[in-house]
Image (spheres, grey):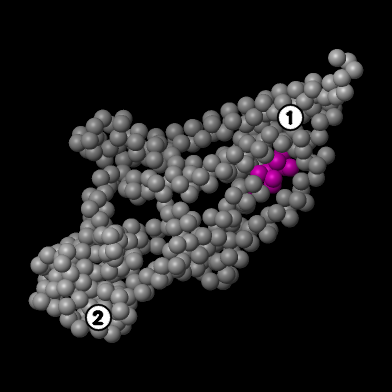
Amino acid sequence: MSNVPGHAVYPGLLRLLIIDRYLLRQFWHSFVICFCSLTGLYVVIDGFGNLEEFINYAQKHGSLLGVMGEYYAYRSLSFFDTTSHLLTLIAAMFTVTWIQRHNELTALEAAGIPRSRIIKPLVGAAIVIIVLSVANREWMIPAVRQHLSHNAQDLEGSAAKPLQARYDNETDVLLGGPGSQTFADQQRIHKPDFDFYLSAGLDRYGPRLWAEDAFYRPPRQGRPGGYLFVKIEQPKGLDQKPSLLLRDRPVLLTPYDTPWLKPGECFLASNISFEQLEAGTDWRQFASTLELIHGLRNRSLDYGADDRLAIHSRVVKPLLDITLLFLGLPLMLSRSNRNVFLAIGLCVGLVIAFMLVVLGCKYLGASYWFEPALAAWLPLMIFVPCAVAISQPLRQ
């Protein structure tokens, strides 16, 4: 066997694999502990602050632990999305500090293993977390956004919320009015007041449409999406009047020529969903990037700078996360002090500086000082050259 070419490579490869497993174990151990600790701290603080609401809800819907467990299980997805980049940096820094403190880094370098090879499993683990964060952001959170949109004071979604007026740019209709309230559990608007403006022909029966309730109905079977009004108060005699069109598109449908409508009802077609109407500009918080992009094509929505900035920020975020890691690792590998608390201080200082720049650029973009695309990509333009400049220890 001693004459087999390359046989001596296998022990070296095996040692590298053992080192990789050791570093990965330390990394995942630190990451899980940090995530569970921060999540547990959040649950304790928020849970005790809303304990009365949970008790009242549990009396009707099961055990207290079950109610709180379900509530915070959904919240943990949002918490992971918010903290994953920070926890990745903390776990990597703790891992590097650990092997430095026990002189293991020195021993590895003495064995001829370059630093770039030593941190390779840490970078791979960080990329895995970034991929998981993207999957969580794009698929898991949108799938459970109905649960995430309800806070502890409205666990059933049955509490009334004031409706903020929203303008439908396609039909020139202002949706909302004083005194209108929304109920998420039924997708219902109570006492809706919809004002028609700047729409030739739509104000033929009066400038306003009042009713007892309006229910959102999604588009299906050839029917447009919009709001079904029941118990109409104004205008009077709408049942005997034909539907109104805008640019050959039915907008206000009446029972006169719409068989599926009952007397005392009407239907207002709109491409603004109940979720978008209820949450206003906050609906994008739990929407996927694909939904945000589709919103750009929705002529009923008025996408401002903040919405366009959010789309670009979603694309840039994975790149910023990996950039933050490459900013932190050189700081750890280039210093001689092996104090764990100093590592925490460096981590906190780096994250604060990083987040201030990112938030500052977002503010400038949302305030129309910069173009939204430039404001989202500017932090990457600033920090990537910095990461390259200080990454010399990683190439040694």
* Quarter placement of the N terminus: top right
Residue extending farthest to the top is 1
Assign the magenta stretch its main secondary structure.
helix
Q: Label 2: how many residues lie within 10 Å, few (<14), some (14-19) or many (20+)? A: many
> Helix, strand or loop at disc 2?
loop
Query: Which quadrant of the structure image shows residue 6?
Result: top right
Q: What's the residue at 48%, 49% (across, down)?
A: 138
Q: Nearer the viewer, residue 369 or 170?
A: 170
Q: In the rendering, at what x and y percent does residue 215 appear?
A: 22, 60
* N-term-proximal mark, 2 vs 1: 1
Q: In the rendering, at what x and y percent does residue 114 appear?
A: 81, 34
Span shown in magenta:
324-332
Q: How many marks?
A: 2
Q: Which residue is mark 2?
A: 202
**In the rendered structure, which amino acid carries the disc numbered 2?**
Leu
- Tell whether 192 sits left or right of 122: left
Q: Which residue is mark 1?
A: 100
* Quarter placement of the C terminus: top right
The mark lying in front, picked from 2 and 1, is 2
Q: In the rendering, at what x and y percent does residue 293 appear?
A: 48, 61
Q: Is residue 12 above or below residue 253?
A: above
Q: Is residue 101 magenta?
A: no
Q: Are marks 2 and 1 in contact (CB under 8 Å)?
A: no
Distance from Cα at disc 2 to Cα at disc 1: 73 Å
**In the rendered structure, which amino acid carries the disc numbered 1?**
Gln
> Helix, strand or loop at disc 1?
helix
